[in-house]
Image (spheres, grey):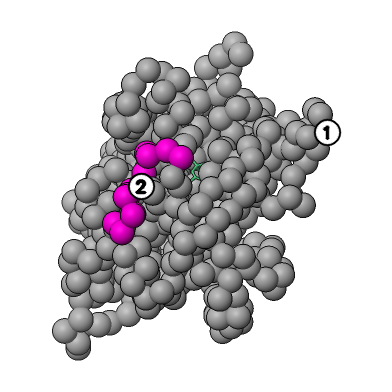
Amino acid sequence: MAATEDHSTTDAPRSAYYVTTPIYYVNDRPHLGHAYTTVAGDVLTRWHRQRGENVWYLTGTDEHGQKIMRTAEANGVTPQEWCDKLVEEAWKPLWQHLDIANDDFIRTTQQRHTDRVQEFVQDLHDKGEIYKGGYSGPYCVGCEEYKLPNELLPGATEDEKLCPIHKRPVEWLEEENYFFRLSAYGPKLLEFYAANPDFIAPATARNEVLRFVEQGLQDLSISRSTFNWGVPLPWDEKHVLYVWVDALQNYITAAGYGADPERFAELWPASVHLVGKDILRFHAVIWPAMLMAAGLPLPKRVVANGWLMVGGEKMSKSNLTGIAPTDLTSHFGVDAYRYYFLRAIPFGTDGSFSWEDFTARYTSELANDFGNLASRVAAMVGKYYGGTLPAATAAGAAEQAVVDGLAKAAAEADRKIGEELDFAGGIAAVFDFVKLVNGYLTEQEPWKVAKTAFGEGGSAAGSEEGQARLATILYTAAEALRATAVLLNPVMPATSAKLWDSLGAEESLGALADQTIATVADWGRLPAGATVTKGDILFPRLEEKPAS
Ligand code: ME8
């Protein structure tokens, strides 16, 4: 478990576990769908940090292209002004609010990016991978993508055709522009997918990409000359680079490509590109082909999340539920928010949000199963031992079952969250353990044992055997909570910190962030004598649902 590669015998920098989110369009504010991917990446990277690995988590914003330009125009500001405002007022604050621990935030209008992008495309041009040609076809500004005629849906009139994702009319574009020889890469891509069966996940996404590439690829139009909000082509400044070509390169420019070779060697290739399934082809077909053309290594994995749905459609700016992420966090709290979407929807499949489901999970899983366990244990250690954790001197089969349950939960969560990105399965494994500890307390009935331990009503006439049992039960439960705090730290960092605090764990074990997954199941880490305090209620009773 928790193996990290040991590079200490070489001079090469220690390679990082490098995870990226899509860089989001800043034509509007972030919604639940964007937050879904970003929280998933945050949990994944926090998990790997908790393993003690060298981790780098990148997110950012995609600021060029027609969609942003038109939004800025409609708002009477320049595109740059629009982007600056949205990034600072909406995007960065939301990630901060959701406790996203990204290491970098890239904006495609930053010079560190645009300079490198120009070098990259110049290099492809020099290598003969780019040529000048003409193209005409239906274009969706929402997707910033030319569509194939057979993908379109019928519109209101015979001539009108709709984008299958945005359900809005596509525009007919006819341009002379530059092309990337994407068609040449089909066979090489298929060879790569075959040799790297884990490159695209889940299996449905992989199959979709295989079918698409097997049909044969067309060359990709990579420049626009009808507007200028983009990175100019260095050899022909009348053209700006197609927004997607510029955007995909964020993953290497942020990693130091062309600017800091040592850092680039450490970070690239990326370990995981997290993407929504809407942008899978860009990441699993176009991006790898561009990297092949440039002679750069390919990312290790592209993992697609499913869609949050509203009324059977992908949740998007135009069909939002009307619920902003902050509407949910102000009702349920940030940690419950981080927990809910990953726990409720198997990663990779579509799912929808409902107040009822969120409320039910909050109440039964977070408040009752987990929160109550923590407060009951702290209360009993307070009541019977004045807040000083007793030693477990009479452990038997029941305690062994808890020890074994922890080992199983830790191994399962590590595999599912850390490797398979099965967040729902990994979190469920930890919560099965929480249930097991609750069951253990229900069976052991420490409140009854306390009566024999200390005599009815706290008189001195108690039994030593009873005292040993009570101490053992409470130690076992507290030690189980110590491990739970570590296992849930990537998902609910503020809650885990409160629990860590209430267990008095910092004094003997150090900071929660320094606890590793490899040692989480080593039983007995929390020493007897730790100062246990009641602390805040982890998941307070919910207020009435706000009127919608
Ligand atoms: O596509 N459910 O940006 P974007 C789940 N700039 N995830 C969702 C979602 C939903 N309903 N809606 C959005 C772009 N997402 C490009 C990316 S990358 C080089 C350039 C998430 O603002 C999901 O991750 O449209 C999706 O891929 C991403 O937001 C799209 O964000």
Main secondary structure along the magenta-highlighted residues: loop
Residue range in magenta is: 226-238
Residue displayed at 68% across by 40% down: 163
Depth check: give the residue in front, 505 or 64.
Answer: 64
- 528 shown above or below 354: below
Disc 2 CB within 8 Å of nearest ligand 1 atom: no
Within 10 Å of disc 1 (Cα), the crowding (few <14, some 14-19, many 20+) is few
Secondary structure beneath label 1: loop
Q: Residue 477: x, y in percent?
A: 44, 52
Q: Is residue 523 visible?
A: no
Depth check: give the residue in front, 139 or 342.
Answer: 139
119 part of magenta stretch: no
- 122 shown above or below 73: below
From the image, tell me which residue sits under label 1: 158
Residue displayed at 35% across by 63% down: 121
Residue displayed at 24% across by 55% down: 115
- 273 shown above or below 369: below
| CA–CA distance in space, label 1 to label 2 | 35 Å
